[in-house]
Amino acid sequence: MHEQNIETLRDEALRLVALEINVLQKMMGELGVLTEGKSGEKQTFDRTSAQKHIEVLAGEHKKLNELEMVLAVVGTMKAGKSTSINAIVGTEVLPNRNRPMTALPTLIRHTTGQIEPILKFDNDRPIHTLMGLLRNSLKKPENAAAIKELVIDSDMKEIITLIKNGEKFKTRYQGADEIFLFLRGLNDLVRLSRALEIDFPFSDYDEIHELPVIEVEFAHLREMAQAKGRLTLLDTPGPNESGQPHLKKMLREQLSKASAVLAILDFTQLKSEADEEVRKELSEIASVTKGRLYTLVNKFDQKDRHGDTEEEVKSFVAGSLMAGSISSDNVFPVSSRWAYLANRARHELHVNKKLPDAIKHPWISDFGEEAFGRRWESKIHDLAEVKASADALWKDSLFHAPLEKVIRTAHIRAAIYAVDSSAAKLVDMAEKMQNLLNTRATALGKSADELERQIKNLKQDIDRVESIEVEAKLNADTKLKKLTKGTELVFGGVKTHIAEALSAYFKEGKQLEKRAIDSKKAEEKKQELTKPVGSAGIFASLMGKLGKIRYSISTDMDFDPDDPVMKFDKRNDAEKLINKIQKSISGIFENAESVMQLGMTEVLAAFQVDFKNDVVRETEKILSEMKSRFEKDGFAMELRIPNTSKLALGFSGADMLGDIVSERQKTVTRNRRQSGAWGKVCGWFSTDDWGWEDYKTTEQFYEIDIRNIQNAANRSVDQAVDGLAEAVGIYIKKPLNDGINDFFAGFKESVEQIRGDLMQGIRDQEKSKVEQHELILKLSALKKNVPDILTDSRELKKDVEQYGTLAV
Amino acid sequence: MNDLAPITRDSEICQVLSSLPEKFIVDFANGIDVARDHLRVQRQRTGMGARFYDGFTGQGARRQAEINASLIDGVEGSLIWLGELTESLALSNYAIVKVNERLSVITQNVTTLAHYSANTRQQLQKLSTDLNKRCDQLSQQIDRIDFEQRAERQLEQVFNKWSAGRFNTFSLAGRCYAAMEELRWGVFGDYCRVHDNQIRQGFLGDLANRAISQLTNDARIEAAERSDMTFWLAKPTARTQLPDATDALAYLGDWSNSEVQPFVFSISQLPEQRPLKFPNRCNANRLAPALVSELFSEQYL
């Protein structure tokens, strides 16, 4: 399959949307076909809902026409994410100075004719509600101390003042500087709400269209054909940088929905960054962006003669760093800085026919130096020369190829996404039209009694479905409880394991400690013997005595087999033991993780099986009974069980645990180091009393406090339990409940709608014979349109599903 | 003036599509405009109709055609020529009925118009009698018990022709359309026209199935496999394509309406802007029945 195919699917979707709008409008236009909605009943379409459906379809038409290509840009600031974004845009949209990490993802949308970037923040209500809450919280006396601490940070002080004064964010910000201030304010707000423990309304910003958007013309895309769609960059922190599970889930979803993803790495840090952290982050991104991930290895301009070649970088990133989860064809060493400078210069030339003043615009000198070298000032006014050099610099930046490729992919994915979404709506709408027209036309030929009977039966169906719903929810609840209990059990086991492991290591450590002290004693003795006894024999023997006493004292004090603190002279010994302990605890965690993963997957799978077996089967039974009742009376009905795909959770147990367990493990390690696992003590081996001060030494020793480790580990386990409870809520409970609710609501709605159509059928019969005859003619004329639309929509849906799986 | 060669019933394209001359004669009859005393359609003298006109007047030479044109353009001349044509050609029932229908309209109009000579009226009378006689004969055939067999035989013949590659000059969709037009103009069409919906649906179901199977054979794909319309409408390679193939289908389908017969319209007229009801993708299962219903629905037969 190639690009052309998805274009045909898109055309086909556009055609069907137009056709359906057409039929709906005809239905609206024919007197008596659609009526005003009656309260307490729901028809498939009444005049109001039909109008809404037309609007929904018009929205789909718009989406198909103006393909929204979302290109997510992921990367740390160090790697040059802002510069890369500026390079794509061709102007400074994100200030390159010390920018705070993005709290909320920001959109940057190509908007033809918008030369100066403008930020639009229309979804400001949730933020302002939050600011109201924060304002109240700031007034509370118990927060005074915390606030005092916070306002040390001048940015924080600013936002606090803003909130205290009841000021609001604007909905428009013009220019890079204003945009910067807004983004910083937003970020401070996230930090502040975290500090005051008020939930930031992330869920109000988890859809792309809810995010603040910067509109600006992308210099590079000025000439791009409208049919290609509209490119929007999604500036987002990587999933691992976000911390909070809410934010993390949201970012993962956005990444998985993005048309393409551009991950930015730092060429100069490539080898040193090649540690677990980056690898993990990248593989996580790769796992949700299969086939749509491209990697820019930025700062390739800093390569020296001995640096890796383009090919070497490509194969290193694809092979070593990403372990094959990305093809080397999709790794691009680039210079975002060159690309940005070149693109910006070309942009200025295009818009203003000249470059701006170099004094006011420092980027000009950057550009000059890169394009012309140190003597740039003599050449910067020759526009032809500037143009040629900018083109050359753009070429050297190697930015063109990845940009082309990523936009092409984004376009295909965006088209698939848009067609997929409209195909589902098209099928649904066509089935609805078919149902309404068939039901009403058939109902006209029935007696009122027959209709009443059908209506009564439908009411019973709804009651039955409702009782199934209650049961399904109970079942889900039980399963969740079981899951929680199971994980608690596992965590309990983890604690015991850790305690056992630690006591074993404690013994080992103590032995080491003893051995070390013994050998030290021997050393001392040796020293004693070889000590020059030149000064005075009497002192020598005394010193020997002293030495002995000191050591015996210290030994007694140091080696206490019950003391939870282990002391080591050699850093190496201490580190060795710590490493062993760390490894072992990690092992315990890993073990627990895999047990829990299995458990979770099992519980969830069991739920899905139950749901399929009990709920879906029961509902299907009701449905088929309904259908046969209707068929017997000559009604043709398009009814199906709602989609259960929502119940197949998008996140595996591994995804979810990945969050919690690794986080906790890190804490364990960190705590061990921070908690003064080893200290440094200076001991003085000298006494003035004896009149010789020539022997002075510093001794270092290292201590490991087993209690600290135990506590830290237990604290981590406890935190993991808490975190897991939260994660179960976010990842499992909510989606599961939502899925169940959607399933039943969907089913009940379609039954209710048929009931509403039948009730309207009774009202139709109250009309005169002539009117009834006219209505039949209208209904059957309209009906003729629908079967082809339904067939074509269903086929389109299959096509795009197939295409989607092939394109991945 | 028409620059392309005249078409006669011996032309290769007429061997492929026997319905072409029949359509021409019906068009010719319909073009006789009594009120203005000339032939409406043929005045334009371009396209397929004009080439038939040249071909059937038996005059390849353009000059001679012009002479005849001035003669036949008149109603009287037209009627004479129509009489000759209907006698010399073994016309299908459908064509004769259509010409006859037109004739009765002309007869009605002529009686209200004073300027027609006795000659013309006489000519009309004769033609009318002839055609009525033939119509009677045909309606007797309809009552004969072998009517159904003859309809089935035509179906067989047309599909034999298709599977033998005789329609390979057309696109895949074009072959399907051509086959159905042949049937519609022939005894199969007659059979469908005189029978009620239930019997007709049985026949049409057969037709759709055979068309699907032949289409999938030609296309070498499954009946449910969807392809872009460009695939179904792609012209065959130049070697297998007759020069008149595209024009012939366009001529056969010139009656179609983009709203009412989107498939016939799109396949025969190949418009730049395809109608909204014509899909961008479809499979044989969708294509063949759509053509059947557009060509054989009660209201369009």
Image (cartoon, coloured by chain):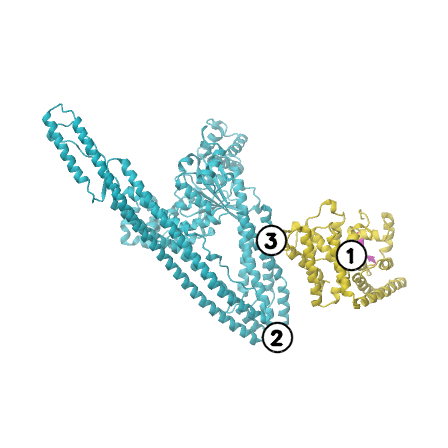
Is B140 located above or below residue A381 in the figure?
below
From the image, state the color of chain B: yellow
To which residue does mark 2 refer?
A768
The amino acid sitting under disc 1 is: Ser
The residue indicated by pointer 1 is B19
Q: Is residue A153 visible in this depiction of the protein?
A: no
* Dot 1: element: helix
Asked if one can make out residue B298 in the rendered structure from this viewpoint, the answer is yes
Rendering colour (chain A): cyan
Co-location on one chain, circles 1 and 3: no
* In the foreground, A247 or A486: A486
Gap in Å between the C-alphas at discs 1 and 3? 34 Å
Q: What span is colored magenta in the figure?
A: B37-44
Mark 2 belongs to chain: A
Residue B38, quarter of picture: bottom right
Q: Nearer the viewer, mark 2 or mark 1?
A: 1
**Residue B42 in magenta stretch:** yes
User: Callout 2: 10 Å neighbours few (<14), some, many (20+)?
Assistant: few
The residue at which mark 3 appears reads as A12
Q: Residue pushed farthest bottom?
A: A449
Q: Chain of mark 3?
A: A
Please report contact status of discs 2 and 1: CB closer than 8 Å, yes or no: no
Q: Nearer the viewer, residue A180 or A576?
A: A576
On screen, residue A208 versus residue A633, left or right, reads left
Tell me the residue at 30%/53% (across/down): A139
Q: Secondary structure at mark 3?
A: helix
Earlier sequence position, callout 2 versus callout 3: 3
Residue B24: give x, y in percent of width and height.
80, 56
Where residue B70 sits in the image (x, y, percent)? 86, 53
- For the residue pair B130 and B137, the one nearer the viewer reads as B137
B63 sits to left or right of A180:
right
